[in-house]
Image (spheres, rainbow, N blue to C red):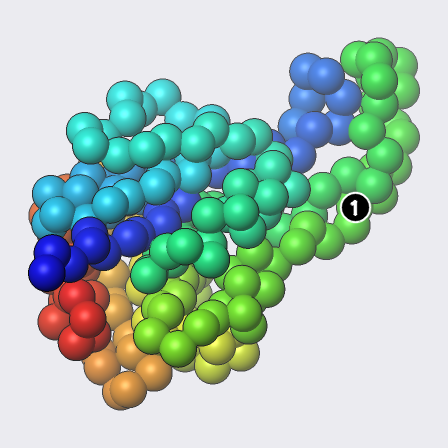
Amino acid sequence: MKTRPFRCLVTAGPTREHLDPVRFLSNPSSGKMGYALAAAAAAAGWRVNLVSGPVALPPPAGVNIHRVVSAADMFQAVKKLFPACDILIMCAAVSDFTPKQVFAHKVKKGQAELAVEFVPTVDILKTLAARKRPGQLAVGFAAETRNVEAYARKKLKEKNLDFIIANQVGGAGQGFASDDNSVILLGRDGTRAALGPAPKTKLAQQLIARLRAGHSSL
């Protein structure tokens, strides 16, 4: 009897929260880590759906790509794909806030003193991890500028994750937009593995191999 391919859902890149048609709140995420993970998962023989924010990267070979812009867009796309996946790897740098009011037309320079009110976006990973079925894995990323491992362990527990991948961002050659990275993989089972510094493509291969080793159905 032929077994079905393992189904992986990866998110990558930033989101954009528009203030008006030409201005938005975002972050420096290039999508390189998420795209590398999607490529590594496909190379491992997994069936991969990649939900991507706006990036300047070609789609990885053998991956189904779903392009989105805002955090709300990403939530809708991931929510639709999540029930059928075996593992969710939430690598995207999703905006935590979005403007309460989106202007229909470009805000003129003379209005620059206006105060912008923000509201929280949905916590995609926490929302979907709460809906996990038995055997379904939820993997998150924690991009932090300080106390990286402590914050990651807190998120691992609070968001009901199976694994979290912690990395420091904000410094030269660290995290966002860099070709290289250093990460710490933490598991709810006590797993701890420090990986890198290494190219993100190599780290992605190592992470996929460790996630495979950490779950009997992989």
Q: Residue at x 58, y 47 (%)?
A: 75
The quarter of the image holding the C terminus is: bottom left
Report the side of 140 relative to 4 (left or right).
Answer: right
Question: Badge 1: few (under 14), some or many (20 or more) residues near its Cα, within 10 Å?
Answer: few
The single residue placed furthest to the bottom in the displayed view is 190
Note whether residue 134 is visible.
yes
Image location (x, y in percent) of residue 22: 68, 15
Height in image: 117 above or below 107? below
Note whether residue 169 is visible.
no
Image location (x, y in percent) of residue 20: 76, 21
Report the side of 123 relative to 154 (left or right).
Answer: right
Q: Residue at x 70, y 28 (%)?
A: 18
The quarter of the image holding the N terminus is: bottom left
Image location (x, y in percent) of residue 213: 12, 71
Amino acid at dot 1: Phe
The single residue placed furthest to the front in the displayed view is 1
Height in image: 54 above or below 169? above
Closer to the camera in the image, 4 or 48: 4
Image location (x, y in percent) of residue 164: 35, 68
Number of marks present in the image shown = 1
Residue hosting label 1: 118
Q: Residue at x 37, y 56 (%)?
A: 85
Closer to the camera in the image, 108 or 210: 210
Q: Residue at x 47, y 71 (%)?
A: 132
User: In which image quadrant can residue 74 be found?
Assistant: top right
Under circle 1, the secondary element is strand
